[in-house]
Image (cartoon, grey):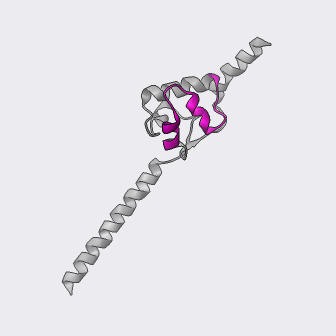
Amino acid sequence: MKKIKLPAVCFAVLVAVMMTGAILQAADAEKIDINTATEKELTQLDKIGPAIAARIVEYRQTNPFQKPEDIMNVSGIGAKIFESNKDRIVVGKPAQNEAEPAKEASKKKK
């Protein structure tokens, strides 16, 4: 009788450990707002390293993203990278400090 209980207990522990791992992995897959995320936060996206993250931040300073697909306008980001991240990318309002240069530039044109 004891021999049967030990495998059942081991199985229950294994399932609990696997569920904890799945929960932690889901936490890593949080949504990232590409208009406000830091370079470090952007590197949490698949296939986005520090160099591309810096280009995203630089791009959005003058061209705030209007929709997730706009990220493909950044050099180095194509359809494959977008497709692997599209479920994690959200677009909110641009950060105030980054939207200001675009507003100032439009005022100068008038």
Residue 86 percent location from the top left of the image: 55, 43
Residue 68 shown in magenta: yes
**Quarter-of-image position of residue 70:** top right
Q: Is residue 47 left or right of residue 65?
A: left
Could you say which is closer to the camera, residue 64 or residue 23? 64
Residue at the (46%, 53%) spot, across then down = 26
Q: Residue 106: name its quadrant.
A: top right
The residue most toward the bottom is: 1
In this rendering, the answer to whether 82 lies above or below 29 is above
Depth check, front residue: 77 or 6:
77
Q: Is residue 81 left or right of residue 36?
A: left
Q: Is residue 69 left or right of residue 78?
A: right
Question: Nearest the camera: 44 or 84?
Answer: 84
Q: Residue furthest front?
A: 79
Region in magenta: 62-84
Residue at horizontal 43 percent and vertical 57 percent from the top: 23
Magenta region includes residue 67: yes
Residue 1 placement (x, y as % from top left): 21, 87
